[in-house]
Amino acid sequence: MKIAIDGPAGAGKSAAAKAAAKALGFIYVDTGALYRGIALYVVRKGKNPSSIEEVVPLLAEIRIEMRHIDGEQHIFLNDEDVSELIRMEHVSVAASGVSAIPAVRDFLFDMQKEIAEKNNVVMDGRDIGTVVLPDAELKIFLTAKPEIRAERRVKQLAEKGVFASYEDVLEEVVQRDYNDSNRDFRPLKLAEDGILLDNSEYSLDETIEKIISLAKERGA
Ligand code: DC
């Protein structure tokens, strides 16, 4: 069974998808981490993440792998575990840049498809229900108001000991929404048969419950 969870940054996709996957006994796949892995490589090389000319030649040097260690997804970039490094704010912005490049999306497409063919998955991203797994049994578009998403993000960063101002985070959230939803190639959008779930008023637990109950309705 395949469950696709798409939506903008900060809607709580990864936390909700991860917990729902655990409860259902499925594998959780965070596809944003793959784009982040490429972004990290591009940033390290000092190249512009939004430039097709600068990014595409680098793809031949990149090997991204997803390994599950103790049930946790780890991302390896040319054999280096970069699971933590890819969470840096500047990598988030660079990931949004590289993700608009068609060759980058194609580069990661087969990998995502293959994982879903071999396992029961809860996969989160931006184009999972629309492009990667159009035949998913359940497609959820998880979103929340930008102000709420920014608040959650500030809290999340504070828990990691990182201070970020609400205004800066809100600006980044709005900018990333705009980029992800307005790129020409495979933008973030609700699948025709997707379920829109706005969790502005929900707790994380309520969001997880909702996903699990929708999954069970579909035979999980
Ligand atoms: O979910 P995330 O914040 O880790 O994703 C990082 C960036 O990657 C995000 O700005 C959009 C892009 N992305 C994408 O275009 N398609 C996906 N399936 C997942 C992420």
Image (cartoon, rainbow, N blue to C red):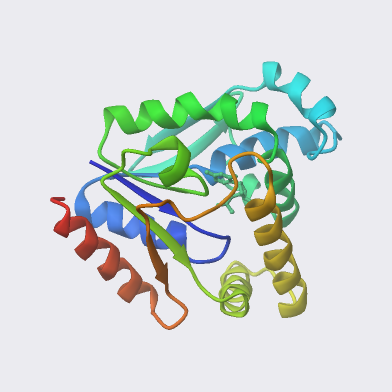
Residue 16 shows in the view: yes
Q: Is residue 202 left or right of residue 31?
A: left
Residue 44 image offset from top left, x and y in percent? 79, 35
> Which image quarter is the N terminus in?
top left
Q: Is residue 68 left or right of residue 188?
A: left
The residue under the point 47% across, 56% down is 190
Residue 30 shows in the view: no
Q: Nearer the viewer, residue 129 or 167?
A: 129
Residue 112 image offset from top left, x and y in percent? 44, 32
Residue furthest to the bottom in view is: 201
Q: Nearer the viewer, residue 150 or 198?
A: 198
Residue 48 image offset from top left, x and y in percent? 85, 38
Count numbered badges in the picture: 0
The residue under the point 27% across, 69% down is 210
Q: Is residue 48 left or right of residue 169?
A: right
Q: Nearer the viewer, residue 82 or 12?
A: 12
Residue furthest to the top in view is: 60
Residue 3 image offset from top left, x and y in percent? 31, 48
- Is 97 placed above or below 24 here? above
The residue under the point 74% across, 46% down is 94
Q: Nearer the viewer, residue 215 or 164?
A: 215
Give the quadrant of residue 20.
Answer: bottom left
The residue under the point 40% across, 52% down is 192
